[in-house]
Image: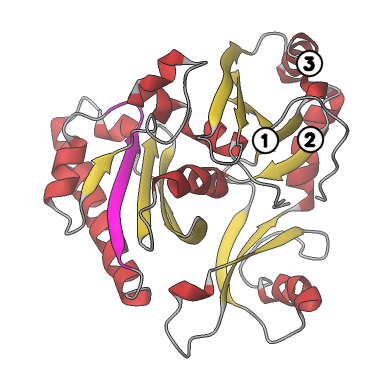
Amino acid sequence: MPPFFSSRRKLGWLAILPQGGTVTLAHVVREQNSRPEVRLLENFSVEGGERNALQRLSIARRFSAYACTTLLGGDEYNVTQLDSPPVPREERREALRWALKEMVSYPLESACVEVLDIPDAVLPPGRSAGVLVVSAAERAVCALVAVFEAANITLAALDIPELAQRNVAALLEDRNRSLVFLRIDETGMMLTLTFHGELVAVRRGEINTLQLNGNDAEQRVRVRERLVLELQRSLDNFDRQYSHIPISRVILASYPQVENLAAELGENTYVPLQEMELSGVMDFSAIPELRNPQYQAKNLLVIGAALRSAEVVV
């Protein structure tokens, strides 16, 4: 989906995220030599249907004055790591489209496909350049866009949760070191590896905070053990593949909070692990509630979506 920008008066991006009977808005402005500033963060219950709710919000919050973006749902797209094909750059997308033919269930002829380069610096000498291929069925993209169009909202871009999480992780990286970011919420978990602000690798899983906070003590123990093992395996895999870009630390963002989870994970990994705290890298003066790390974790994806740069995914 190509970017299309209308003249507007407000800097930055407005992320609009309908999810689970609510609509969350975040407006973030990134200016040179300043911390990214969250100027708006609001959550609304959906009443009278999603389209009507979006239409009312669009008028009340003057969405037409912003560059708007939203996120595809986790089951609406695929992210696949592949070697970059030996073709001219302008032919690469089509070559990779057909490389996916055994990996997705939707028609590739009409699928939306975008290519994200893995930084050359992460690859050992002699290894082929790598890419992350983001693909989505045309029907899924059209269905999402149609909801916004019906509400008279123009989307300047459509993004994915992996890149929203990357945008946040990039703020926390240490110089010339990679960063592992583990997000766990009620819907599942996502683990990303970033370097120089770019996405290198992604792992998704079904472990969630409902399980980690469940009433069954034995199940809680089993789920924690699975999570520890998943993190250990991921770190080992990243170390084998990208040993020359050492991981500085693991950042954990969980919502709702899971008691003692950071301490337990930290005790079982060889990389320092810290809970996410964004107050040092973002300006929350307009939204004081965001000084609470749990409020940050709750709104991580919508903030990350509004932190985007100009590149477009699908």
Disc 1 designates what residue? 70
| Residue at horizontal 71 percent and vertical 61 percent from the top | 114
Q: How far apart are the two marked residues, 2 and 1, measured between alpha carbons?
A: 8 Å
Q: Position of residue 314 (x, y in %)?
A: 73, 51
Q: Amino acid at mark 1?
A: Thr
Q: Nearer the viewer, residue 157 or 146?
A: 157
In this view, the mark in front (2 or 3): 3
Q: Amino acid at mark 2?
A: Leu
Q: Mark 1 and mark 2 in contact (Cβ < 8 Å)?
A: yes
Figure disc tally: 3
Q: Secondary structure at mark 3?
A: loop
**Residue 93 drawn above or below residue 35:** below
Comes first in the chain, label 2 or label 3: 3
Comes first in the chain, label 3 or label 1: 3
Comes first in the chain, label 2 or label 1: 1
Q: Position of residue 95 (x, y in %)?
A: 74, 77
Q: Amino acid at mark 3?
A: Arg
Q: How far apart are the two marked residues, 2 and 3, measured between alpha carbons?
A: 14 Å
Q: What's the magenta region? A: 246-257
Q: Overall secondary structure of the magenta stretch?
A: strand
Circle 3 packing at 10 Å, graded few (<14), some (14-19), many (20+), is few
In this view, the mark in front (3 or 1): 3
Residue at the outermost front position: 33
Disc 2 designates what residue? 155
Q: Mark 1 and mark 3 in contact (Cβ < 8 Å)?
A: no
| Residue at horizontal 44 percent and vertical 72 percent from the top | 122
Residue 135, quarter of picture: bottom right
Q: How far apart are the two marked residues, 3 and 1, measured between alpha carbons?
A: 16 Å
